[in-house]
Amino acid sequence: MKSIADLEKIRQATLSKVNLRRESEGTRIVVGMATCGIAAGARPVMNAFVDEVAKRNLMDVTVAQTGCIGMCRYEPIVEILAPGKEKVTYVHVKPEMVPRIVNDHVVNGNPVVEYTISNAE
Amino acid sequence: MELFRSTILVCGGTGCSSSGSMKLYERFEELLASNGLDKEVKLVRTGCFGLCAAGPVVIIYPEGAFYSHVKLEDIDEIVSEHLIKGRVVTRLLYKDEAKSQELKPLDEINFYQKQKRVVLRNCGVIDPENIDEYIAFDGYKALAKVLTEMTREQVQQEILASGLRGRGGAGFPTGLKWKFAMGSTGKKYVCCNADEGDPGAFMDRSVLEGDPHAVLEAMAIAGYCIGSDEGYIYVRAEYPIAVKRLEIAIAQAREYGLLGEHIFGTDFNFDIHIRLGAGAFVCGEETALMNSIEGKRGEPRPRPPFPAVKGLFQKPSILNNVETYANIAQIILKGADWFKSMGTEKSTGTKIFALGGKINNSGLVEIPMGTTLREIIYDIGGGCPNGKAFKAVQTGGPSGGCLPASMLDTPIDYDNLIAAGSMMGSGGMIVMDEDNCMVDIARFFLDFTVDESCGKCTPCRVGTRRMLDILNRICDGKGEDGDIERLEDLAQSIKASALCGLGQTAPNPVLSTIKQFRNEYEAHIYEKRCPAGVCKNLMRYVIDPEKCKGCTLCARNCPVGCISGTVKQPHTIDQSKCIKCGTCMEKCKFGAISKK
Ligand SMILES: Cc1cc2nc3c(=O)[nH]c(=O)nc-3n(C[C@H](O)[C@H](O)[C@H](O)COP(=O)(O)O)c2cc1C
Ligand code: SF4
Ligand code: SF4
Ligand code: SF4
Ligand code: FES
């Protein structure tokens, strides 16, 4: 290591891995991962979110899991909680939908209405 | 790039390791692999979280679920419930949280609420054996900053302006210490005191185990400031985990070129060695420590000359405590004003205490200076167990003193504690309740110093021995009129003439207990009575004939058979044979036996 730039490179590369150990202020993506959710395919969805967040190097975003949200017939369910905004709930989420949710909603702040629960009902 | 959705932090601190956390770690490793979760969930062994009384501790992020008293059998459930199904296992949550049956963020648990984790910020968060994780949280950035942007004088002035005072006990301003060593030219040394000999103290060990790079980085900064290219860490051999993590950290820092030659491409060179201490308390004293590093007997040398002039290998040197160093990088990065915003005017920043004794939440606590004893003992520590009454708190270890309940509202800082007759010391804090005898406590600490005195000077070697003899006599019920005054006279002359800090402070526990609890000394001496019922020769077990039902249980359990009586008749104890083991009182179901 010869310069501060080298140090910064290691910092950036490691930060995203350790960042979720701090209670973060940023957006939380919460995937319902109870038995019903897993049976409906929540695991690949969760992994798709993790990959997408990593790929885009999003620092303030955490992907978390939660238990049964209580609407099993809509599983896999994903909730996105951005600071200061109302919670948005996506239903019947498939891995293919994830890049768009991350791009439109998490990064640009425009929920993908057609995937949300209000649309399903 | 890898990213994990969850992180399991298994405490690898000393407390939790001794209650089996390594086994838990291995079981997690196994189960993550067999469930195919090892690519999604990261497993990390961290340093102490501070709540050792609740150990072994496991924390799972991003939920921040704090599991306490985790057993090997629980791991399967945590993996299948929490990690696979995403349901927090409420049964295992730390009790403070479990009451509400829902998850509270870690910083809302009472134990952490009043704390401010500055020095311990990385402990329990990063993997101490991975330098990248330290770097991720701004590690080595302060070293880069001083080497590329600051002059030596600016570094010294920043540290001085922060008001940082030595955390090893005496509270000497660190910036001033560095200044004294800056003047001369030629070979100099930077030393780190990780000897931590106070009974009950484990702050420094926890920093070394949880965040070793913080100390290495600070020593390099100190090296740049005073103009030194070589450092020594003097660490107790009884701290094998700390030693191992330091070795790993030094190797990783060397590999990255953060120790060695031309650090960050500058002309600055610095390297660090570890020296193991044999565990004598006096080796924590600065001149004795330097003798010991040099391979000589660990005996204090007379001062002057001071280490800043003639220290290690007769070269100008500085010595700072582990916790002192652990503040340095953050002061450089965040500035002296930030540091001064915490604490009191004359004692800035935070201090770590090892809270122990008769307290519900024993463990490591880091608080801003100026927090009151009451807040530490009640709000953080949860008070004395079993509803017993608080009696005193001892700070400063064998050099310190006891503070009674009337002083609970004292804000903690260096000067207040000294004014109250104790001292900060390195941060041991032992809580005592109504069942502790203060004469016995004084005797305990003096016994420790008598054992640890190196014997080089007479006041300490002979004087502390004589004080201990008097205390032993008092506790045995053979105290005489004038003993208190004799203790005070001896104490004054030892304080005035001992060569090193060990002797000079050894009488403090006695003096402070005489000052605050003189009535207990008097009860021992004049009434031959130990009010707390601790000193065996001064108490008796007696059976209350009114309450005794004659069940014979006590008589059957007395190991020396000194209880007599017939069935259904009140029993009596033969005091001349009783060995005061207390068994009878424990056994009696009718509360008929008491200590007098
Ligand atoms: C008998 C005795 C034991 C000591 N033990 C320690 C110790 O274990 N750790 C420590 O940091 N300082 C200890 N000290 C204080 C050191 O001599 C020294 O003041 C301190 O390490 C300086 O660092 P600081 O200015 O950062 O506090 C001890 C002093 C005496 C007299
Ligand atoms: S005061 Fe005690 S420990 Fe210190 S040099 Fe004298 S005998 Fe040794
Ligand atoms: S155990 Fe209690 S009640 Fe029974 S004989 Fe002994 S003192 Fe009396
Ligand atoms: S204190 Fe022990 S020795 Fe004494 S009477 Fe009770 S059981 Fe017997
Ligand atoms: S050793 Fe685990 S919390 Fe202290």
Image (spheres, coloured by chain):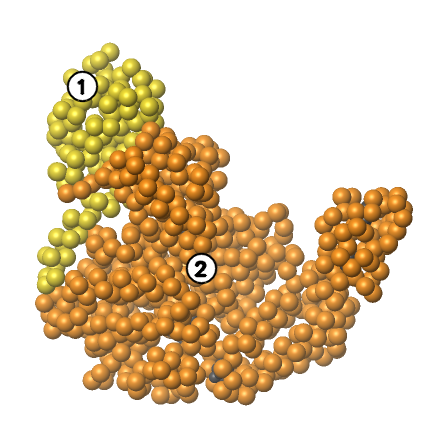
Chain colours: A yellow, B orange
Residue at disc 1, secondary structure? helix
Q: Position of residue B238 (x, y in %)?
A: 42, 67
Does the rendering let one see residue B512?
A: no
Q: Which is nearer the eye, B270 or B80?
A: B80
Q: Which residue is mark 2?
A: B353
Q: Which residue is mark 1?
A: A115
Q: Position of residue B497 (x, y in %)?
A: 52, 86
Tell me: B367 left or right of B459.
Answer: left
Task: Please state the horizontal and vertical placement of residue B405, each as a whole percent of the image.
Answer: 59, 58
Q: Residue B535 versus residue B256: which sits nearer the camera? A: B256
Residue for point 44% across, 39% down: B73
Q: Is residue B2 left or right of residue B480?
A: left
Asked where in the image residue B364 lies, by quadrant, the reply is bottom left
Q: Considering only vertical position in the picture, is B411 above or below B549? A: below
The image shows residue B486, relative to residue B416, as above or below, that is below
Chain of the residue that carries numbered disc 2 in the rendered image: B
Q: How many marks?
A: 2
